[in-house]
Amino acid sequence: MPSSDSEDFESADEGRISPNKRERKKRLSSSNYSDNLEDQDNKTTQEPVLHKVAASVKDNIPKDGWDDFDIEEESEPTDIPQKEEIKTAPTEKAQASIAQKIDSQKSGWDDFDDWGEEKDINTKDPQLIPKSQVQNVKEIPDPQEVTKSDGWGWGWGNSLLSTATAGISNLTTQVSQGISTVLETGIGAPDPEELARISAQNNAKENNADSERRNSTETKAEPNEANQSNANEGAFPFGSLLSGVTKFVETTGTKVLAGGLDTLETIGKKTMEVLQDGDPGLAKKRAMLGLDSGDKPVLSQVLREARAKADEEDQMKEAKREAKAVHYETLFDDFEGLVHLEALEMLSKQVSIRIEERLRSADPNKRQDIKETLQQVAELCEMPDEEDEEEDEISEGTSRPDALHERLQRATRDIGLKLQFQPLIKQFTETLAWLETSDVTITEKAVYKKAVSDLAQTTALSVELYHKTAEMLLVKNRRSTADEADALTQLTVVLTKHISDLATQFTEKLTNHASEDKEQINNYITNVFLEAGNSSKYIENAFHLALPIVQIGAV
Amino acid sequence: MTSGPYNYSYIFKYIIIGDMGVGKSCLLHQFTEKKFMADCPHTIGVEFGTRIIEVAGQKIKLQIWDTAGQERFRAVTRSYYRGAAGALMVYDITRRSTYNHLSSWLTDTRNLTNPSTVIFLIGNKSDLDGQRDVTYEEAKQFADENGLMFVEASAKTGQNVEEAFLETAKKIYQSIQDGRLDLNAAESGVQHKPASPGRPLAAPPASRDPCAC
C-alpha cells in the first residue's frame, strides 16, 4: 500500500464534519449506481486504456487542473506534494494516490448534474474520458470551498477516501457482478451513505497500521476475496475512470461493494422476492429465514436451530420409548384389568337397560317409588368425604398383608358373598418382600418400574374384584341392597387406601435410595403418585359401574 | 408376568360358550398354557385368556372370554357376547344333554353377536371315545346344517384344540380380507392395532409356538 495511507485517514477525520445527510443521499441515489455499473462492464476489457487514463489524469492534474484553484489557497500546498508522489508511484498504487488526491482536495461536489452528461459522453467515445475526467477533477476544489459551510461536502470527502481504500482491498469481480445484477433488477442496495459512514468510522478507528486497516475493511467482505482484490487493485479503479465516471461515482460504487455481505443479503432478499412471485409456498421459507422481519438470516443459526429441534425430537422419542417400558395402561392391560373393566362395563350397561325396562313397564304410580329407591341406593354408594379411622382397629403384631385381608373382609362382611381376596393379599405380600430386600444394586429406575407395575397389578386385581362381585351379586338369590351398597363403598375405601399405602411404600424406598440424580428421583416419586391417583380412579370407576348391579337388587 | 414386544396387528375377541362341565375352561387352558387342568373350578361369570397367534404372516392377539356354563350365570354371560369375532360352542361328546342344548346356545350366539361372527362347534373330550354319546356324523351334520365349522377335540390330550382356535382365526381373517367384516363397526370383535414396538403384550407369546398346526 502507498505510504501515504496515514495521510488519507487524517484527512478522513477532518472531512467528517457534520455531513448534510439528506442532500448527500439524494445525490447518491440518482446516477451513481448506473455509473458504477458501467465501470464494471468496461473494466475487464479496457484495462490497458485505464492505465493510460490514469496516467493522463496524473499528467493533467498539475498542468491544467489547478488553474481555477487560485481562489482556494489552502488546499494547494497540500495537493502539490502529493501529486509529485503520484507521479512516481507505480500504476498499482494509482488508486490509492487518487484517493489521496481526492482527500487532499477535501472535495465536496455539489454539482452532480454534470456527471450524467459526462457519462453519456464517455460511453459514446471513451477517448474523451480523460479530458472530462480531468476537467472534473479540476473543478472539484471550487465547490469544495463553496460548500464547506454546509458540511455535506466534507462528508463526501470522507466517504470517498474511505471507500476508495476499501475498494482496493475488497473489490472482486464477483461482487461487482453481483452489484450489476442488483442494479439491473432495480433493487435498492444498502444505503451508500450508511456504508460510507460505517467504513469511515472503521478507518478512523484503525488508522495506524496497514494490516489493521485491511482487517477492518475486510470485515465487510469475504475474507478470501482479499487476495483476489489485490490482483484487481490496479485495474478496477481505472475502469471507472475510463467509463467516464467521476472518481466520486467510482468510489461510491466501491463503497457499495464494500458493503460485502450486506449487499449480498440484499441480493438474496430480492431473489427471494422474485422467486416468491407466483410461488406462495416460498413465503413460508422467507418467514422461516426471517427475511421479512429484516433480521439478517444467519444460516448457521438456522442450522443450529434445526439441529436443536432434531435433538429435542430424538430425546422425546427416547423418552416415549422409555415411558412405554413402564407404561401404566399397558401393564394394567397385561394384568387383565382392562378386560375385566370392559366386562364390568358391559354388565353394567346391560343391567342399566334392564332397570330402564322395569321403570318403563312399571305402574306409573310405582315409577316414582322405583326412582326414589334407585336414588337412595346411589346415595348409599357415595364415597365418604372423610375417611373415619375407626376401621383401623387391627390388633398389633398383625402382618400388613393380614391387616389388609382383615380390612377387606370387614368391609365386605355384610355383602353376602364369598369374595376372593387372596390374589390381592398375595400380591401385597410379594411387594412388601421385594421392598424389604436391601439389595443395593437395585437402581431407582427398577424401584420405579416395580412401583408402577405393582400399582397396575393391584388395580387390575381390584377391578377384577368388582367385576366378580357384580357377577355374583347378579346371581345372588337374596339381595340386601343397603348392605351391598355399604360393603362396596367400604371396599372402595379400603382399596384406595391400599393403593396410596403402596405408593407411599415405593416413594419411601425411592427417597431413601442413594443417588446423585435427585431430580430423577423426584420425577419418579411424582410419577408414582400420579399412577396411584390413576389407580384410585380406575377403582372408583369400577365401583360406579357396579352401582346399577346393586340398584337392580332393590327394584 | 413376562412382557414381549407389542407387535400384533389385530385383536380378535373370542367367546367360549356351552353347558357347564363340557370343558370350556380346560380347552382355553390347553390352548393358552398347553396343559390340561384336571381339577378345574367352576367359572364365575367370565374368565379371560390371551394368546398371540399368526395368520398369513399377521400377528393376532386372541382375547378369549371363557364364560360360565352354569345356568344361573346365563343372564350374566349373555352380556358378554357382544363384539365377539369368534364363538367357540362346546359340547361334551360323552353327554348327550350338552349336545341337545346346542340349538339354545346357537340361538343366543346368533342373537347376541353380529352376522359375521365365526361360530366353531367343538365336540370336547374326544379322548373319552369309549363313553361317546354323540356320534361325529350326527354333530357334523348339525354343524353343516347351521353353517358351523366343526371338530372333535380333547382338552386333555390337546388333540384338535389348536386347530379349533386357529381355524376360527383364519376364517375371521379371511372375512376381513374379503371385506365381509367391517373393522370399523363397533361390534366386529376385531380391533386393528398398528404395530408399535416397545409395548408389552397381554400374554407371553415368546415362550410358545405361535402355530403348531
Image (cartoon, coloured by chain):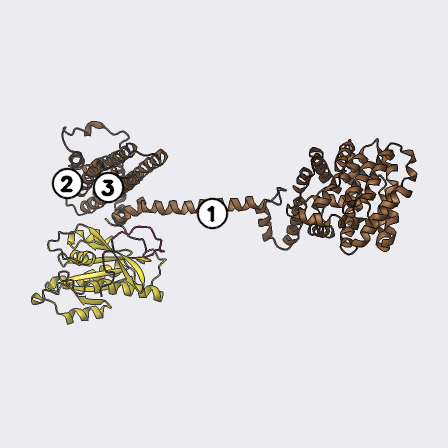
Chain colours: A brown, B yellow
* Badge 3 and badge 2 both on one subunit: yes
Q: Disc 3 marks which residue?
A: A458
For the residue labelled by badge 1, is the local secondary structure a helix, a strand or a loop?
A: helix
Q: Nearer the viewer, residue B73 or B12?
A: B12
The residue that appears at 74% across and 52% down in the rendered structure is A184
Q: Report which residue position mark 2 lands on.
A: A416
Give the percent coordinates (x, y) of residue A525: 32, 35
Residue A310 numbered tag = 1
How far apart in space, not on screen, are marks 3 and 1 (Cα)? 39 Å
Dominant SS type (magenta): loop
The quadrant in which the N terminus of chain A is found is top right
Is residue B21 in view?
A: yes
Horizontal and vertical percent position of residue B126: 13, 65
The boundaries of the magenta stretch are B189-213
The residue closer to the viewer here, B131 or A307, is: A307
Mark 2 or 1: in front is 1
| Vertical placement of residue B171 versus A475, above or below | below
The quadrant in which residue A259 appears is top right
